[in-house]
Amino acid sequence: MHTQKQAINRIILTALGILLLAITFITAPKVSASGENSFALTGNIFINSTTQLANNVKLHWQVEPGADHYVIDKSVNGTDFNQIQTTTATTSDDNHVNEGAVFYRIRAFNNNNQQIGQSNIIKESIQQDITLSDSYSNTGISQFHGKNAAFKVNDVYYRYKLTVESHKALLEEASSNDGTHFTDFKPVTIKNDSELGACKIESVSIEMHNGVIIVWGHYENATDYSLGRMICISGKPGQPFINHGSFRPKTPDGTEYQSRDLSFFADPNGKDAYLISAASSKSGHANQNTNIYKLNSDWTGIDPQFNPIIANKGLGREAPSMIKKDNWYYLFTSKANGWYPSEGGYNSATSITNLATSKLQPIGNTSGYGAQSGGVGQLSDQPNSPYFTMANRWSAGWKYPDPAIDNKNASRMFLVDMDNGFAAFDYYPTVKYDVGKDKIVPVQNGEILSVNKPAGQVAGDTSAVKDRGPQKANDGIVADSTNAYQPQTSDGQYNWTVDLGKSYHINEVDISFKYIGGSETYSKYLIQGSNDGKSFTTVKDNIQNRIIGFNENVISSSNDYRYIRLKVLGTYKASDDSLQNWAAGFNELTVYGSDVSTSIPSTPSQQTEATLTPSASVSSSMPVVTPSSSSRSSIKTTSPSAAPSETRIHDIKPFWLYLKKSAYLYNSATFHKSNRIKKYHVSSRVFGPTFKVVATAKSVNGVLKYKLSTGYYITANPKYVTNLYWQRFRPKLIVINSDGVNSFYSKNLTKKEAHHKKKAVLKIRRFLRRGSKTVFQLSNGSYVSGSKKLVGILK
């Protein structure tokens, strides 16, 4: 089964043409630059979905043995550093960074506050406004538009693909004189093809060496996975190919190993090439080791004199992928765990030989951010092109597939940062990229609000077992499975609350539940918000949840909250739905959002009504923009199954809308059943879901749609959606919400003045806009929200 997964991954990557592939900061006194580079630091720029600006930096660094805490230093010249934060975590965000160059370093201290180490210094160049041509969604089924890959021989370009239909292997070739317009794929004649008529070939790699096309793959018979062999097929473009036969690789002393998941690595020295195999142990147990075999001079066989490099002995790793960056070799693998997500890992060394003794290091979080690590490659052929991985979410193989991806399989795109043998990646709901500009900039759904904030201190919170306190669930440590909150519960139910310190608008809450491979569990839960720590409102109902491990939750509430509570109603074994109290708890809960006063980019200077098809006219109360002639166009993909790309996406001043009728969210602006994310049902205006719109977009048929802050798309048809806030002065309003509405002394809706019950009539003095929201001033000088879910027009 695991071999099928790697095969799908390799075929997708070949088709796409890729190589495979918030804590508050404070100012402190200046400190001098000193000390050795004893551990590695990496960083990447990301976009905040609230401001839509790429002026935020995420830092990751290695654990320094003996460190009790770390100090983050920042500089604008690389010499004079200021201390900006102290943390016990090994990751942190720096938000709202000024444009231009910025430098960072980390210093490690022991529990006696003595400095015991210092990282390398990294430099980031901030460009707040950045336009990238493509966007990849990690919350649904998305299409990646990679570089156009082809082999050039004698001024002719060639592409190849290997497929297996009805258990018969078929190698096909297409050609082009300009590298853009290719012929249809046609079968290639293969000599010695008797074993290709009833087989499976997976984990396919297609390379070129000295003008010869080399195809390697994992070979099995048509009925099971008992063979565990490699196979090589080669030939010159435009000529017949030859099958060199399938085999189990042997060492010089004759030891034979089974081989399943397989990948290819060509050393940048231009001479040596290797196969990395999920190999058996000497005793024949599958997927026990990661074996690295050197190929012969023509890359069509194993070098018979080379002893394989054996890494990860007995650790059960699969899906290998190897790269070289800055004189370091990185070997990425995932833990063998059937179809379910698993923790990713990597080995690193300055020589391939030393990978055998390098320690396996974790990457990502404890459950691979809901996926299994895949191949790692660069966005373009440029030497310093960013690295990324397409991790595999094998939902179709789960007992309860993920409904957000239509119960199918999907990939999650992670930007991979590496330095001096250290590697890291994070989960972002959206990743923007541009092959032409050679840039990848992920999008985070607001600032991290919850790290190291007070937790488990609100009435009703569940006490914890010893050394598994509530503060471990929001300390920023995501890759250590032993660092978790474990409640004292006899029935599997528990509450955990974090105090954010003040009210924020909440965009997303991500939870990494405890995860034990082979004993996977899921939790049924509610996410609730409060401003007083006593009265809580449910903002996300996941009582029907069946997703194991990492759970990402987009929050659609238009209200702001200070307290966020996780209310778990039970933890259950995925295989038989039995209650598993021992598995109660979670490793990390991260709250993303924005300060109520966060500034929003201004609306374009000129807005006009777009020309629409009859089915998508837009209410005059909702902003629409006519895209300019310089609107983006998507990079073409070589994938034959890729959906048409949307064009003419235009960022606008964000605003809130709510659903009037039931509707779907989609993964792209061209709506198809296959890219539906979720259906929202509407019973009344008061209970209708709300969404934040950040851009307009048109489908390939020219129908206007709205792009949401989550990266999803929704209809712009006014029969289904309308602005959440009243847009002009009204002399009288009536309270329509069953819970009534509060009035406030401040126009920022702080400092409660009074409560008005349902059907109360409010006399209005004036109308005000507050960012993307509106408020009304009452005749007595107090203020109420202009939300249509709270107040209506008195006719």
Image (cartoon, rainbow, N blue to C red):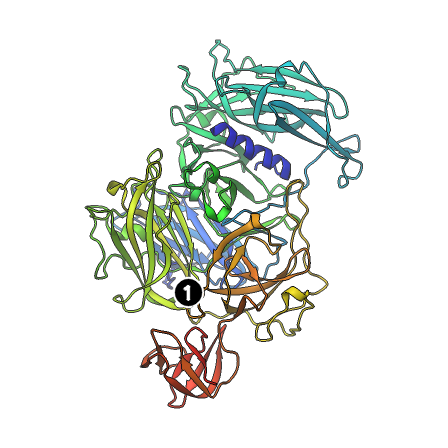
Query: Looking at this view, is 78 or 161 the one in front?
Result: 161
Residue 223 location in percent, x, y?
52, 20
Quarter assignment of residue 576: top left
Q: Is residue 489 left or right of residue 220?
A: left
Q: Position of residue 86 (x, y in %)?
A: 34, 56
The structure residue drawn at horizontal position 23% and vertical position 50%, both measured from the top left corner, is 469
Q: Tell which residue pokes out farthest to the top in this image.
A: 254
Residue depicted at 57% across the width and 45% down the height: 386
Q: Residues within 10 Å of mark 1 (few under 14, many from 20)?
A: some
Q: Quadrant of residue 454?
A: bottom left
The answer to which of 385 and 414 lies nearer the viewer is 414
Q: Residue at x 44, y 68 (%)?
A: 684
Q: Is residue 225 above or below residue 425?
A: above
Height in image: 214 above or below 781? above
Q: For the view shown, which residue lies furthest in the front direction? A: 683
* Kind of element beneath mark 1: loop
Residue 369 seen anywhere in this rendered image of the structure: yes
The foreground one among 568 and 254 is 568
Q: Is residue 78 visible?
A: no
Q: Which residue is mark 1?
A: 557
Which residue lies at the image location 38% right of the left edge and 66% below the top edge? 504
Q: Position of residue 331 (x, y in %)?
A: 48, 32
Provide residue 155's location: percent of width, then percent of height.
Answer: 80, 33
Who is closer to the viewer here, 711 or 703?
A: 703
Residue type marked 1: Ser
Q: Is residue 641 above or below residue 201?
A: below
| Count of numbered badges drawn on the protein | 1
